[in-house]
């Protein structure tokens, strides 16, 4: 069930110039959050930003009653969020959307491919898969090493593989040219820039591997009311906020083939 709360920022960390993370607590019990679900954050104190901003849930600690967000500064809203400090409040609607499918059996294998801010939901996902006994390979990419934040957080949950365009960290080139990408997996999950996700989806389809993509279309209401986030799927138009953001590629041929 969706809830709205004023969360308190209990921890803030900066990751290079572009990224920061916030750990948030509202004092009560957290709603269960499926990896891939997101929150809508109200941006206070910035008159240019009227609408809430969608941000994926990066991590959840049910015992501590906290959830974490990993945010890339791109515009006025995220710049304002970056100014917040420990003790400040953040008004959040959560949990929103349809998350990743977690039906893999123990000892099966999954590849998680993330790029840019699309890395965010993959930590919660890798933890959930590890808890189910799934062997995860986590493949993260960015233009430079600085643009792959929080990579060490993934180390306990699988084999970490990195790719940078300039070769400053890990394999030099795109994630799809990393040798780990060509291995066989029972499932591929991906979140990041659209061209990256389309290339991942096309390759998964060609190799007959199940695959889910998490779209990051621009959003307004976040609950399926305004239709501004609609995407064209093989089953017609779907709201990314309500029917996604996670979609199985078997319904997304139109999307990944263009
Ligand atoms: C389901 C979902 C989950 C997301 N999760 C995260 C996350 O975990 N961490 C994170 O940092 N960001 C995430 N985003 C993206 C984030 O919502 C946007 O970066 C944010 O809304 C930008 O707000 P702003 O006011 O700073 O920038 P704006 O001033 O609104 O925009 C600045 C620039 O960024 C572009 N932009 C804005 N939103 C998007 C978008 N969704 N996709 C591509 N370009 C965009 C605009 O066109 C503009 O050029 C997510 C988006 C969605 C839909
Ligand atoms: S953001 Fe309003 S319908 Fe999706």
Image: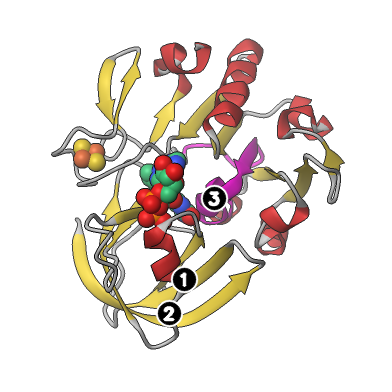
Q: Vertically, is 179 above or below 218?
A: above
Quadrant where ligand 2 appears:
top left
Q: Nearer the viewer, mark 3 or mark 1?
A: 1
Does residue 105 belong to the magenta stretch?
A: yes
71, 132: nearer the viewer: 71
As helix, strand or loop, the secondary structure at mark 1 comes to helix
Query: Distance of mark 3 from mark 1, alpha carbons?
Result: 15 Å
Mark 1 touching mark 2, by CB under 8 A?
Answer: no
Q: Is mark 2 within 8 Å of ligand 1?
A: no
10 Å crowding of disc 1: few (<14), some (14-19), many (20+) = many
Q: Which residue is denoted by mark 3 in the rendering? A: 117
- Asked if residue 34 shows in the view, the reply is no
Q: Are marks 3 and 1 in contact (CB under 8 Å)?
A: no
The x, y position of residue 85, in whole percent, is: 44, 83
Residue 75 in the image: state x and y as whole percent.
Answer: 43, 56
At 78% from the left edge and 43% from the top edge, which residue is drawn?
A: 164
Residue 103 at least partly seen: yes
55 displayed left or right of 70: left
Q: Is residue 36 left or right of residue 150?
A: left
* Tag in front: 3 or 2: 3
The CA distance from mark 1 to mark 2 is 23 Å
Q: Residues within 10 Å of mark 2 (few under 14, many from 20)?
A: few
Q: Which residue is mark 1?
A: 82
Residue lying at the far bottom in this picture: please name it.
87
- The CB of the residue at mark 3 lies under 8 Å from ligand 1: yes
Q: Is residue 163 above or below residue 34?
A: above
Q: Which residue is mark 2?
A: 64
Where disc 3 sits, the SS reads helix
Q: Residue at x 31, y 34 (%)?
A: 240
Q: Which residues are magenta?
A: 103-126
Quarter-wise, where is residue 78 in the image?
bottom left
């Amino acid at each position: 069930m969706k809830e709205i709360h004023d969360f308190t920022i209990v921890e803030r960390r900066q990751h290079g110039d572009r990224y920061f993370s916030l750990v948030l607590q509202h004092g009560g019990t957290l709603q269960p959050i499926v990896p891939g679900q997101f929150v809508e954050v109200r941006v206070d104190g910035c008159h240019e930003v009227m609408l809430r901003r969608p941000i994926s849930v990066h991590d959840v600690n049910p015992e501590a009653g906290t959830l974490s967000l990993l945010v890339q500064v791109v515009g006025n809203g995220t710049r304002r969020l970056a100014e917040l400090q420990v003790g400040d409040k953040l008004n959040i609607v959560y949990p929103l959307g349809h998350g990743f499918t977690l039906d893999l059996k123990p000892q099966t294998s999954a590849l998680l491919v993330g790029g840019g801010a699309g890395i965010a939901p993959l930590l919660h996902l890798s933890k959930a898969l590890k808890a189910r006994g799934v062997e995860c390979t986590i493949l993260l990419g960015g233009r430079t090493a600085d643009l792959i934040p929080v990579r060490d957080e993934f180390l306990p949950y699988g084999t970490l593989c990195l790719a940078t365009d300039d070769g400053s960290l890990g394999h030099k080139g795109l994630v799809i040219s990393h040798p780990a990408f060509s291995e066989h997996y029972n499932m591929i999950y991906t979140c990041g820039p659209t061209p990256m996700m389309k290339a991942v989806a096309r390759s998964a389809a060609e190799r007959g591997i199940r695959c889910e993509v998490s779209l990051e279309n621009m959003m307004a209401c976040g609950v399926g009311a305004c239709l501004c986030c609609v995407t064209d799927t093989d089953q017609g138009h779907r709201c990314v906020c309500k029917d996604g953001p996670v979609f199985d590629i078997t319904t997304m041929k139109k999307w990944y083939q263009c």
